[in-house]
Image: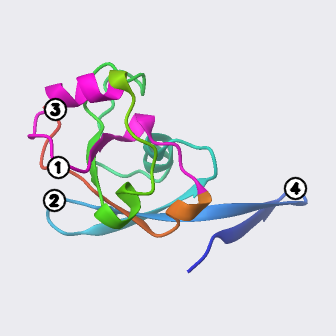
């Protein structure tokens, strides 16, 4: 599996496929561009479960998600600000908990599985 090509206006962009797993096990797909946040990719695809009450500014912890371990170890570590906000999630934080607003999608994340919690409040 590798990045997909999307063209428009004569330009070709590599798209990264993401999988969002709902609490009931339903899988929803989203396509993202390199450099886009995980949150914005989910919002553009109409993925439910990431509230982002603060608009993606890392001040509410309502875009809490769980990153599959295989990809989590390749990602940059959460910032101090994100670490602090992860202390306020509605569902207890786990080892691979992250805030979707703080994850910048990169090409190596193609095929990433993001697990959504049962609730954000």
Residue 83 part of the magenta-drawn span: yes
Please state the horizontal and vertical placement of residue 25, each as a whole percent of the image. Answer: 19, 69
- Residue at the disc numbered 1: 117
Cα gap from disc 3 to disc 2, whole angstroms:
16 Å
Instruction: Identify the secondary structure beneath mark 1.
Output: loop
Locate residue 23: give its quadrant.
bottom left
Cα gap from disc 1 to disc 2, whole angstroms:
6 Å
Q: Earlier in the sequence, mark 4 or mark 3?
A: 4
Q: Earlier in the sequence, mark 1 or mark 2?
A: 2
- Residue at the disc numbered 4: 9
Cα gap from disc 4 to disc 1, whole angstroms:
38 Å
Observer-side mark, 4 or 1, equals 1
Observer-side mark, 4 or 2, equals 2
Task: Answer above or below: position of 2 versus 79.
Answer: below
Q: Earlier in the sequence, mark 3 or mark 2?
A: 2
Q: Quadrant of the N terminus?
A: bottom right
At x 40%, y 61%, the residue is: 71
Residues marked 1 and 3 touching at CB (< 8 Å): yes
Instruction: Identify the secondary structure beneath mark 4.
Output: loop
Instruction: Identify the secondary structure beneath mark 2.
Output: loop
94 with respect to 2 (left or right): left
Residue 103 part of the magenta-drawn span: yes
Residues marked 3 and 2 touching at CB (< 8 Å): no
Q: Which residues are magenta?
A: 82-106
Q: Earlier in the sequence, mark 1 or mark 3?
A: 3
Please state the horizontal and vertical placement of residue 47, each as a whole percent of the image. Answer: 36, 52
- Residue at the disc numbered 2: 23
- Residue at the disc numbered 3: 89
At x 72%, y 69%, the residue is: 5
């Amino acid at each position: 599996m590798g990045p997909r090509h999307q063209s428009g206006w004569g330009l070709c962009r590599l798209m990264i496929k993401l999988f969002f797993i709902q609490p009931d096990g339903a899988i929803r797909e989203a396509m993202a561009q390199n450099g886009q946040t995980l949150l914005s990719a989910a919002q553009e695809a109409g993925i439910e479960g990431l509230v982002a009450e603060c608009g993606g500014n890392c001040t509410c912890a309502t875009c809490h998600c769980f990153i599959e371990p295989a990809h989590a170890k390749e990602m940059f570590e959460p910032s101090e600000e994100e670490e602090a906000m992860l202390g306020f999630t509605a569902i207890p934080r786990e080892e691979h908990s992250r805030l979707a607003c703080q994850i910048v999608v990169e090409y190596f994340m193609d095929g990433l599985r993001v697990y959504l919690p049962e609730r954000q409040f």
